[in-house]
Amino acid sequence: MARCSNNTLRTVRFYEEEGILRPAKRTEGGHRLFGREELDRLMLVTDLRLAGLSLDEIKHILAVKERGKEAAQEAVRALTQRIDELKEKLDVLARLRADLTETTDIMSACIKCTDGLFPSSCGACQTLSSRPTLPRSMKVLWTTSEARPAAEAEQK
Amino acid sequence: MARCSNNTLRTVRFYEEEGILRPAKRTEGGHRLFGREELDRLMLVTDLRLAGLSLDEIKHILAVKERGKEAAQEAVRALTQRIDELKEKLDVLARLRADLTETTDIMSACIKCTDGLFPSSCGACQTLSSRPTLPRSMKVLWTTSEARPAAEAEQK
DNA sequence: TTGCTCCTCACGTCACGTGAGGTGGC
DNA sequence: TTGCTCCTCACGTCACGTGAGGTGGC
């Protein structure tokens, strides 16, 4: 179970404590035996966790079949909202990925810099300053740190 | 700061305790004043947290400019690996999104079901059983729960 | 002067991680 | 018989959340 779903044993036991999984039976020595459909259940829970749902929200969604029509409608609403949030998260991650890729590309070039400016005098580098915009991660990670401790601009 | 980066005040304070942020100065009454570049820093940290990095990993990456060439190379390697992981995560989320969308579509149709089968006798529904494959979330959430408590198939 | 926002402790929480010490099953 | 894998407590951890009680600044 744990290995098939890419989880730890502790996670599987924890989900059992929480009532999310139920082993079909135990072996003589206490080993858990799970039904095949529990693996599907665990894999769905794993995906939903990855998508950022809390265990309480997941329990709520899993309870659909034990409850009535209004519960199903509620679950559809909850899932729809989550799908929208997923899309936003996907967008953020894609943006970050692009930003980081650009940054590592520039950094790799900087490391090969032969002007003797790297890494202390990058502020004087015309290759960098000729770029219209630097990715945020580049700005934060690479620009000189002298300004930081003594910065005076105000912003609460 | 907090609002611009979509974080709570507690988070900003916590990052300060952790040495990730440093307010430029304090007002007479103790209010924190931050420099503009701290906001860029905070926004990058926020994105990296969203991407699943731990604060320790983030601190490591932020320390690049204080350290030498080999630190920069190490940071590029670390970021490259994270970018790959991001791609995997993006794929998982996209799959889950498609799966959940299909499921909510089917569920919405089921709720409007006029055969009197919903929700107890969905197993007898030919509209469902005529589909070649159900999305996993549909299988887990919708199929009858009678099999669960007494399941006997073995899988450790 | 009145709100609303910020402040500092300090304990709580969520979802597991991590040993310690012991047994099971091929 | 020897490993490797599983078991049960039970305390630890990470990244904040959440009051309680108090001050600041427009």
Image: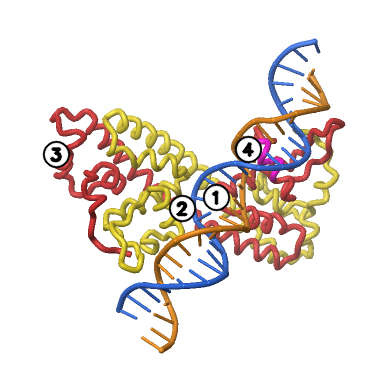
Chain colours: A red, B yellow, C orange, D blue
Choose mark 3 or mark 1, whichever is in front.
3
Chain letter for mark 3, please.
A
Q: Which residues are magenta?
A: A5-14
Residue type at numbered disc 1: Ala
The tag on residue A125 is 3
Name the image quarter holding residue D26. Answer: bottom left
Q: CA distance from mark 4 to mark 3?
A: 47 Å
Which mark is first along the chain, 2 or 4? 4
Q: Earlier in the sequence, mark 3 or mark 2?
A: 2
Q: Residue at x 66, y 47 (%)?
A: B134
**Residue B105 visible, this orientation:** no
Q: Which badge, 3 or 1, comes first in the chain's sequence?
A: 1
Query: Residue B99, how many percent across, how many down?
Result: 58, 49
SS at badge 3: loop
Residue annotated with mark 4? A7
Q: Per the image, is A12 magenta?
A: yes
SS type, badge 2: helix
Residue topped by disc 1: A51
**Residue type indicated by callout 3:** Cys
Does the magenta run of residues contain A58? Answer: no
Q: Is residue C21 left or right of residue A5?
A: right
Q: Are marks 4 and 2 on the same chain?
A: yes
- Which tag is nearer the camera, tag 3 or tag 2? 3
Residue A151 % position (x, y) = 23, 55
Q: Chain of mark 2?
A: A
